[in-house]
Amino acid sequence: MRNTHSALVLVVCSVAVSLSATAAEKRMPDIVVKKDGTRVEGRVSDEKFRDFVTVRQKRTFVRVKRDDIEAIVTAATPLHEKFRYDPTPKYLALLASRAGKVIPLEEAEKILSQTTKHASKTEVADLLLKALRLRPEDTKEVVGANIAAFEKKHGARAVVYESDHYVVLSTLDMASVRRIAVRMDGIFREYSSRLVFSEKIGERFVVKVYRDRREYLSTGAPAFSAAYFSSRDRELVGYKTSSFDEMFRPLYHEGMHQFLHFYVPNPPTWFDEGLAKYFETAKPQLGRRLAGKPSYHVGGIDRYQARYVRDHQSELMPLPKLFRMSRQEFYTVNTSLNYAQAWAFTHFLLESGNKRLKQMWIDYFFELRDGATGEEANEAVFGKINMPGLEAMFSEYVRRL
């Protein structure tokens, strides 16, 4: 599964230090699709020749006349377009996830295998995108229906505000909603700058913020939550706390889930929650703004989590077991300690100062981004390392937190 490419260049950093995959980064090949249905795979040259495109392959160069080209598919190509020319089960499952639907890989394979063998790949893909309502216009309709339902339910109290990256639906006043939009656009930029995918998110995410906890819970929110992300409805939901600033901690956490699941719909739970808690501590830097949005310090020490994981160090899961925990296990058995350990291990990989550990995290993310299951990512990244040695390093890091 180690076909990494420039769809993701991970930047894990504090404000002053960053690390990208650089020379270790690999890319899946570009695909030049010709009008006659044939394909040329390789690396499309950046040079701008008027009459032809140059495709660099391992030991040769291939020139393709521009007049013969139907499409060029690269890492930056939107997923629905990639699927049109390369209809794979992985792309179908991910497109479904982005539309708030669930199509397991096994079912995606079955759907594709049952399509007619006499149609071209693009015809098959277009048929499935339309039938399953997975086109960009279909997902926009979902957002529009969400807005209409919110306005119908809350009437004159409903506030709808579109920012650069979010549609904010709220029962707060417009001034508060604008402040929320500015903060969320700022943290979105932090997500993007640290997890840089070539394919950009071309749609606005929905975030709902209710005026108080009572109204929040009346919508069916989880009883003990401060905010949540619904993968089914593709929305982030929270409420205004007594402290306006404190409200954002759970929103940053759940917003990371929303961002990550756009690209990786079923990440391992330790990875998903560890990364969300890593961003949960983000704090705006006074006086530092870019395009009107705050800049953040990310990756700080969560003092509560640090103390909790130190005090319960003897009860921590062996790392291989943490890596393989199902969502049900993670959320029902020693839940608080599971969150603390996932955060501490994520912080250990990203902030210990050890470049090899950071590279493990980067490689793990590459594996997930390229369609690996959690088990496949575990084997690819952690399968051949000295696990007792890694456990010992992590234990020492926890003691020093």
Image: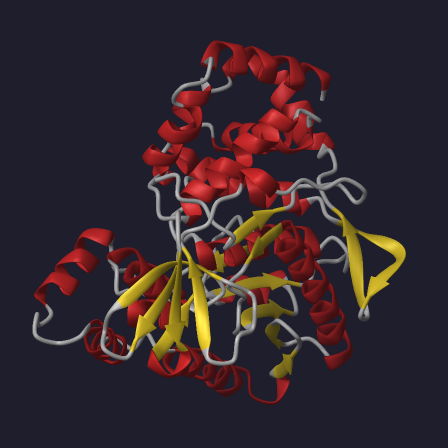
Location of residue 141 in the rendering, given as x and y in whole percent from the top left corner: 41, 83
Quadrant location of the C terminus in the rendered image: top right
Picture colour scheme: secondary structure
Image-based side of 57 in relation to 225, left or right: left
Looking at the picture, does residue 57 appear above or below residue 40? above
Residue sitting farthest toward the right:
287
* Frontmost residue, 371 versus 231: 371
Is residue 333 visible to the viewer in this orientation of the structure? no
Location of residue 156 in the rendering, given as x and y in whole percent from the top left corner: 61, 89
Location of residue 256 in the rendering, given as x and y in whole percent from the top left corner: 57, 53
Query: What residue lies at 64% left-to-right and 65% top-to-bottom?
Result: 212
Residue sitting farthest toward the bottom:
156
* Frontmost residue, 288 versus 18: 18
* Frontmost residue, 246 versus 9: 9
Looking at the picture, does residue 267 appear above or below residue 387? below
Image-based side of 234 in relation to 36, left or right: right
Looking at the picture, does residue 168 appear above or below residue 184? below
Quadrant location of the N terminus in the rendered image: top left
Location of residue 58 in the rendering, given as x and y in whole percent from the top left corner: 39, 47
Query: What residue lies at 69% left-to-right and 75% top-to-bottom?
Result: 172
